[in-house]
């Protein structure tokens, strides 16, 4: 297996395309690998990061009239975007989705979805076989059990996929704090979705704006 290393292997926003798969109520109802609200939070954060960095994002559901609509926290990030509804369990067998990805001209394919062992693993493994550079965002995905999630990750790594978390993806897109174009948006994303890190950032800002005792004019 070819090792994924070197500077060129790091994610770049201008080369990335994100596919969010089946973040729907039916799948969430039997999500047991993670705390469900955390997955909603992380998937939403990933969507917001993609929007902030100008990364094209494809939203897709499976039989939405039965499984429910994509979480509004995600679709609200892209209010004018149509969700591609499929019958294929394997997203990469749906030509509409693949055409949308290919139309971006990007080659760093980033995938997150529910469930990891089915709706993430199948398109990941197929896309890898077709020559795509695939990253799976593990904490914006989830499974019916911890075992199912872990086995799916092992299977995809064996096939050549790269594994990351949403904050690692956003940080890799940022890469350098001297790149100020999206730094404010990333900081706001941390406040909204990064838990203790966001609180610490607000605390830091508070301290920087607090006069030293005895120096008040």
Image (cartoon, rainbow, N blue to C red):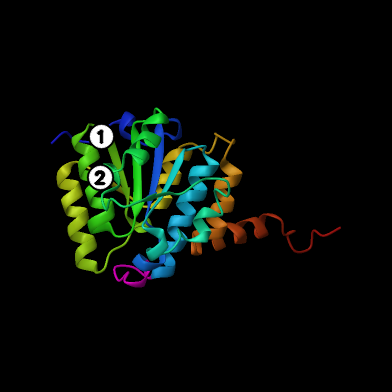
Q: Is residue 64 left or right of residue 192?
A: left
Residue positioned 27% across, 57% down in the render: 116
Q: How many C-alpha atoms fall within 10 Å of the one at disc 2: few (<14), some, or many (≥20)? A: many
State the image coordinates of residue 187 (x, y, percent, origin top left).
57, 50
| Disc 2 secondary structure class | helix
Vertically, is 185 above or below 116? above
Q: Which region of the structure is painted magenta?
A: 28-35
Left or right: 24 as drawn, with respect to 93? right
Sequence-first disc among 1 and 2: 1
Residue 87 point in image, percent of width and height: 31, 52
Q: Nearer the viewer, residue 127 or 165?
A: 127
In depth, the one of 96 and 169 nearer the eye is 96
Q: In terms of image quadrants, where is residue 175?
A: top left
Question: Residue 101, located in which quarter of the rendered image?
Answer: top left
Instruction: Give the residue displayed 18% in from the left and 36% down from the top.
Output: 129
Residue underneath mark 1:
5
User: Looking at the figure, which quarter contains the C terminus?
Assistant: bottom right
- Magenta span: chief secondary structure: loop
Residue carrying label 2:
124
Q: Secondary structure at mark 1?
A: loop
Residue 50: where, in percent of width, then height?
48, 43
Rendering coords of residue 138 (x, y %): 32, 55
Quadrant of the image containing the N terminus: top left
- What is the total number of numbered labels drawn onto the structure image? 2
Q: What residue is at 56 percent from the left and 63 percent from the top? A: 199
Residue 158, relative to residue 39: is it above or below? Answer: above
Residue at 24% across, 39% down? 127
Residue 217, relative to residue 124: is it above or below? below
Between the residue at mark 1 and the residue at mark 2, the CA separation in whole angstroms equals 19 Å
Is 7 part of what is drawn in magenta?
Answer: no
């Amino acid at each position: 297996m070819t090792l994924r290393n070197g500077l060129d292997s790091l994610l770049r926003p201008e080369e990335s395309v994100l596919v969010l798969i089946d973040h729907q109520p039916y799948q969430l109802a039997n999500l047991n690998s993670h705390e469900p609200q955390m997955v909603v939070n992380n998937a939403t954060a990933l969507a917001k990061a993609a929007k902030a960095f100008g990364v094209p994002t494809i939203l897709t559901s499976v039989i939405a009239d039965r499984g429910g609509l994509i979480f509004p926290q995600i679709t609200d990030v892209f209010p004018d975007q149509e969700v591609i509804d499929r019958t294929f369990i394997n997203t990469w067998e749906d030509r509409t989705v693949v055409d949308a990805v290919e139309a971006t001209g990007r080659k760093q394919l980033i995938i997150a979805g529910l469930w990891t062992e089915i709706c993430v693993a199948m398109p990941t493994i197929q896309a890898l076989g077709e020559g795509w550079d695939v990253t799976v965002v593990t904490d914006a995905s989830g499974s019916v059990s911890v075992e199912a999630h872990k086995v799916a990750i092992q299977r995809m790594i064996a096939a050549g996929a790269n594994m990351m978390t949403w904050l690692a993806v956003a940080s890799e897109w940022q890469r350098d704090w001297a790149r100020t174009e999206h730094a404010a948006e990333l900081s706001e994303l941390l406040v909204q979705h990064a838990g203790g890190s966001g609180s610490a950032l607000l605390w830091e800002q508070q301290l920087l704006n607090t006069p030293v005792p005895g120096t008040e004019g």
